[in-house]
Amino acid sequence: MKDIHLRPDERSVDRFNQAVVYINNMKPKPRFVITGGDLIENSFARDFDSADKLYSLYQNTCKKFDMP
């Protein structure tokens, strides 16, 4: 996955969750997922706390991947 650009709005989070569910249901199931590019939206334009909250949202959503 690349350039996720996760934002705090519900639509962005829902779409990322949909992608996680899709990947978790693939047959055969992947052993790992690689993400890259812009994981969260405009981290440099935000203060540290806002960027940190967004990155935490990204990390918590990634925990939903059903990988070994």
Image: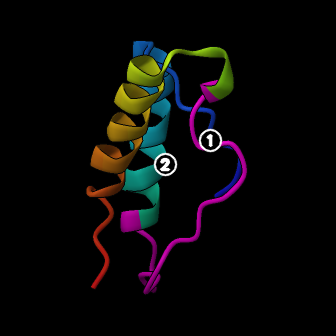
Report the disc number at residue 32.
none
Horizontally, is 67 left or right of 50 in the view?
Answer: left
Coordinates of residue 27 in the picture (x, y in percent): 45, 80
Coordinates of residue 39 in the picture (x, y in percent): 59, 43
In the image, the segment drawn in magenta is 24-43
> Which SS does the magenta portion mostly show?
loop
Image quadrant where residue 18 sits: top left
* Residue at disc 2, secondary structure: helix
> Looking at the picture, which amino acid does disc 1 mark?
Ile
Residue annotated with mark 1: 4
Coordinates of residue 2 in the picture (x, y in percent): 70, 53
Q: CA distance from mark 2 to mark 1?
A: 10 Å
64 is within the stretch colored magenta: no
Report the disc number at residue 19.
2
Image: 18 above or below 15: below
* Residue at disc 1, secondary structure: loop
Q: Nearer the viewer, residue 4 or 47?
A: 47
- Upstream in sequence: badge 2 or badge 1: 1
Q: Nearer the viewer, residue 58 or 18?
A: 58
Coordinates of residue 42 in the picture (x, y in percent): 66, 23
